[in-house]
Image: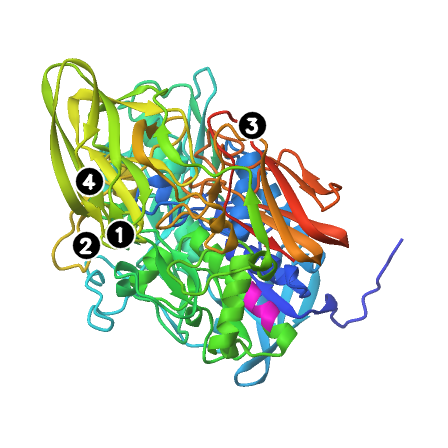
Amino acid sequence: MVESIFTGGGRSNKREQVEVDFVVAGGGMAGVCAAIAASRAGVKVALVQDRPVLGGNASSEIRLWVLGATSHMGNNNRWAREGGIIDEILVENTFRNREGNPVLFDTVLLDKVLAEENILLFLNTTIFAVEKTDTNKITSVMAFNSQNGTEYLFRGKYFCDATGDGLVAFLSGATYRVGAEDKDEFNEKFAPDKKSYGEKLGHSIIFYTKDTGKPVDFIPPRFAISKEEIAKRINRVNNSNYFNPKQQGCKYWWIEYGGRLDTIYEAEKIKYTLWGVVYGIWDYIKNSGKYDGVENLTLEWVGNIPGKRESRRFVGHYMLTQRDIVEQRIHPDVVAYGGWSLDLHPADGVFSKTKKACNQWHSKGVYQIPYRCYITPDIENLFLAGRIISASHVAFASCRVMATTAVGGEAVGTAAGICIKQGYKPVHLLETDKMALLQRQLIQQGAYLPYSEIQYEDDLLKEADIEVSSELRLNEIPFNGPWKNLKHSSAQMLPLPRGKIPEISVRIKAEKKVTQIVELRISSKPFNHTPDTVLETIVLDLEVGENDVTLPFTSIIPATCYVFVCFMNNKYTSIQTSQMLVTGLVSVFNKVLPAVSNWGKQDPPEDIGVEAFEFWCPERRPQGQNIAMHIHPGISCFSKENLKASPYRPVEKPNAWVADLEDKPSTISLSWREAKSVKEITLFTDTDYDHPMESVQWGHHDQIMPFCVQHVVVRDASGNIIAKVRGNHSSEVQFILDQPVITNSLTLELENPSNQVPVSIFGIIVK
């Protein structure tokens, strides 16, 4: 029994001091990835999160899906899913939780963080003050946990602000901006009209519905906006492109408000308004009498806090702009990338009278984000991460999404690890040799740095003689799949070297005697996958029934790139597909995906600085088969040479070693003239970087991606098994041996279970 007697004085909360190398403020996707990256670099980390769960807008509190450059497979960014730690998280979530349960995604994130011995996790802990030794250096942050009544003083050498609102950077005095820049400041033609459209994006609250199997009444709370006001003020409820009462409310991202208010200091006011809107819309669905089949529906869940899109953005050594994104500008200090559209929303949100709830304009490919956007010249030991990085309002409209912020978080955590070990300041990493060190480390971790001259080559692998059991020569994509009607134009992407196009034969079925147009296209930039350049057009005369056709192309391919063999839309014809799936091969279709403003073609106004082009996008499995064809001479770009260096994903070619389809288990043998000490082996497998792997709500056909090598056995020169795994589902297979093995050879036996998918590997690192 404890009794504390009144003394007339006050009391203080319990106080604790936490000493670490790196303090990460904010446990959203950026903060989680920053903390994990630093931890794996051997850094002692405190991860401080003001909510009871990790994930920020991706958590079960808000329930938005993690997404980035893949844009729901609705753009031309092929094989663009973010790599590294966020890929590890999304692949694991797809394996455990392919239905997209947000509560289970919470457990995936918590598992990842708690598995790191170097991370001290503090949930429900809100930072409220910053201490500095001088004007440009933070020494500690102070926080309070309302659940355990404890005040914390977090001391660190370096700090990362991933709080969303930039709380640490703000309290430290760093320069920031709120709202939209004028068009002429950075020559951003898409900059909004500040008066009519507004300067900030608002907040959204998501809700879930459930069919109970029996009638359910709904009596709205008094704070709900009336049915009459909903019908009068919210025009989206009468627009079928946005509103379907039987669709789960989780897709109603357009229930947005607050862009005209202070999105930080008036956040509670915004929340109450959004609650009124949500319950008012539900009253409208249930009780307006306009909708059939809603009698059995009930509200299963409504968000308690809004998902916030925009507040402060901090000024770094460089500010990302619209032109960086659209022009795909090259930066020598690239450490991350994006690919979401330029996605601005009207500040009035759900009450806006604009026809569209957002304006999305895509670029022709992914774009680089430089390291300079993640550090501020004002505070020498502070990194920026998440949506607060140095970007204009227009560029922020793209780089704000969570998978993009996550790769930036990993870059920041990796940079912090280097700085702590080497005694550098963050700005020192801008020096060429130090930046190369950071970039190579990121690549080793599975990150992708598009269009960068810095690529990773493993020293031990360079010295090795590599022998493989087979190499795929793609003479045929077998004619064993279903027929695909060409009501939408369809194309097979083929990786071809510079030179004459090979002879291609296909099988087309015609309902009547008809002509079929076939175009040969490439991208104007070899590293892009937008088929905006037509090399040749042919017209085929088809008879009724099945036609085996050789395409009489004569073009010369100007550089190694993906070629699009495009079968233009024709409702009277169908083309045979294949069940065979191959790393680096994909079929694409000129279809629409309204969720990302893909209407088949992007046709922007002339004065907004965005290009016009067509969308050619894949279909999700189990659809999306390759187009069957004979190819002579066969394509031979799947050689063992691809194992030696990054990138570890397809770009202008597959960048993978692929075995013959019948060669299982397939083997890779590495041999050296002198014995080597081997402690660590990493394999980069194909977990289908074209698949978005949205974290919640969407659901996925595959638990394990069909290209992924699932079974691996590693043997030394004597045939002893030194490492093995069965049932792998991850992008990286990493073996860290208990003791180094001295050997002059390694043999890797690799297998996946599908008889329609050959074994493939993007790269190997041996240490």
Query: In which quarter of the view is residue 476 placed?
Result: top left
* Residue 611: numbered disc: 2
Task: Pick out the residue farthest to the right.
Answer: 1
Residue 744 vertical placement versus 7 (above, below): above
Q: How many marks?
A: 4
In the rendered structure, are the residues bearing label 1 and label 2 in contact, judged by CB atoms less than 8 Å apart?
yes
Residue type at mark 4 is Leu
Label 3 environment density (alpha carbons within 10 Å; few <14, some 14–19, many ≥20): some
Residue 696 vertical placement versus 477 (above, below): below
Distance between the alpha carbons at the discs numbered 4 and 2: 21 Å
Residue in view at x 36 percent, y 29 percent: 477
Q: Is residue 615 visible?
A: yes
Residue type at mark 1 is Lys
Distance between the alpha carbons at the discs numbered 3 and 2: 43 Å
Which sits earlier in the primary sequence, circle 3 or circle 2? 2
Task: Pick out the residue farthest to the bottom.
Answer: 134
In the rendered structure, are the residues bearing label 4 and label 3 in contact, judged by CB atoms less than 8 Å apart?
no
Label 2 environment density (alpha carbons within 10 Å; few <14, some 14–19, many ≥20): some
Which sits earlier in the primary sequence, circle 4 or circle 2? 4
* Residue 520: numbered disc: 4
590 and 520: which is toward the camera? 520
